[in-house]
Image (cartoon, rainbow, N blue to C red):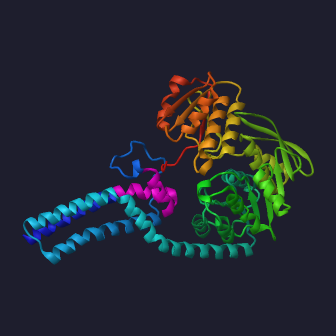
Amino acid sequence: MEILELILLCLVGALGLMLMYIRSNYFIHMAQQIGYISKEYREWINNHPNRAFTFKKSKDEFKKPLVYTPRVKRLIFTQMLLNFLIIALFVVFYFIRKPDGITFYLLLLALVFAEIVMIFYQNAITYIALNVNRPIEALIHRKFYKQAQSKIKSLKKNGLTVVGITGSYGKTSTKMILYNIIKDYIPTYTSPESFNTPMGLSKVINNELDETARVFIAEMGARYVNEIEELAKLVKPDIGVITNIGPCHLETFGSIENIIKTKFELADAVKKNGYLILNVDNENIKNEMIKRNLNPGTVSVKSEDATISAKILSADENGTSFEVHFPEEVRVLKTPLLGEHNIINILMAILVARRFNISNDQIEAAVSKLPQVEHRLNVIKNPAGLIVIDDAFNSNPDGARAALNVLNSFKSGKKVIVTPGMVELGDMMYDENYKLGQEIARMTDISILVGAEITKPIQDGVRDENIETHKSFVVNSLKEATALFPNLLAPGDVVLFENDLTDIY
């Protein structure tokens, strides 16, 4: 009888563990998208109780699946170990007290109840597991960081030049533009998309970068003060590019002053022996440059008082024509890319390219055939005859306005925007989205807002602008938004997809 009771107890425990594993995957997935930061994960639980405290499964498909990286596997192991230890207490109690009859069934009932509670609160177990693993992950990170730091030092002795690019936005576009301008003339390696953290860049340096590269372009992201300094100590940039500074990740930085300070940690890293390039059309950058009495290379599309400046001549769905004022001559360049901010990105890439003695002829040829950067104002011809502008990786006020200007530049067809708005703007979130709503009402014919709650400020802005010809719709998902197209749109209409929130929203 004891054997049967033990088997039954173990089977119930195993079933509970299996259900805990299934449910825990959702919370581990959210933790991965948040960057495994326990504080931000706890805030996600507090801000999304309807998702954290429910057994109801979301009908929406994940935009980004859970990736079973070594870190995720370690987190799963810790979480399941915590679950197992709690279940094991019941088995230990069974061996110590040896309950029989009604007492055993009460123990079994208590185990079932405990498992139901544990399954429901796997969000809390994930939070505990994140904190348990934190010192382990710090040790692993430090090991890879030191290894990558040593490798960079060795490669730089052999002639490697490192270009560090940071900014609130424009980093990835500038990185890819620079890579495509110089790659045919000098062996170049660039960090892949999203590998812009200390751990991500350490992995790239250790596993991918080798002695054949003469230039390494490192995208440098940050969400907290001092993170650019940490990245600069890792890659040791010779050339630094600061693309733009604005209220991006304001919730984690705390203030615009902290964002400026953090981005200019790159300027501190290159000021002695390196070359700094700044976008002086951005007021935050220009003011900090003057405050620090810096003498960098500068770019502008608003003034000729810069190292290199440009004037946009024309733009349509096929690209942009612009006049570039080089120090020694003026040239008209053409590019498939759209948007004033992309011209700024090109100018910054040109300044870097000239440091490697890439000629103006070579630059002009490369700029004319630049590939579009995925999800960043790239134009897609739709089979239904629609013109689609994909700006899904944009979540900042300046970028959103630039995208609206591009949409507004199209002369024919209805102008349509699909957006959930902007996030991580801290106390500015309502006001900035409200202003975006007003501009949407003025500059588009149709707005499709994704998410009834999150787009409330945009809805208010659109309503208060009170433009009778503008039509606005609110839907729950991108799938619902595109389902409206057949009844609303016709061939030749232009659709802007502005920002696409991650699964944590």
Q: Is 216 or 396 nearer to us in this picture?
A: 396
Does the magenta run of residues contain 44?
Answer: yes
Which secondary structure type mostly characterizes the magenta part of the structure? helix
Against 303, residue 278 (above or below) is: below
Residue 404 in the image, given as x and y percentages of width and height? 67, 36
Q: Is 339 or 138 nearer to us in this picture?
A: 138
Q: Answer with the quarter of the image where residue 498 lies.
A: top right
Q: Is 484 or 153 nearer to us in this picture?
A: 484
Q: Is 303 or 256 nearer to us in this picture?
A: 256
Residue at the (59%, 43%) spot, across then down = 430
Q: Is residue 444 visible?
A: no
Residue 269 in the image, given as x and y percentages of width and height? 74, 68
Q: Answer with the quarter of the image where residue 89 lies.
A: bottom left
Quarter occupied by the N terminus = bottom left
Question: Is residue 276 shown left or right of residue 396?
Answer: right
Residue 43 in the image, given as x and y percentages of width and height? 48, 57
| Magenta-drawn segment | 23-48
Question: Is residue 361 shown left or right of residue 470?
Answer: right
Question: Is residue 388 shown left or right of residue 44?
Answer: right
Residue 140 in the image, given as x and y percentages of width and height? 52, 74
Does the magenta run of residues contain 55?
Answer: no
Residue at the (38%, 69%) spot, across then down = 78
Residue at the (61%, 34%) spot, across then down = 461
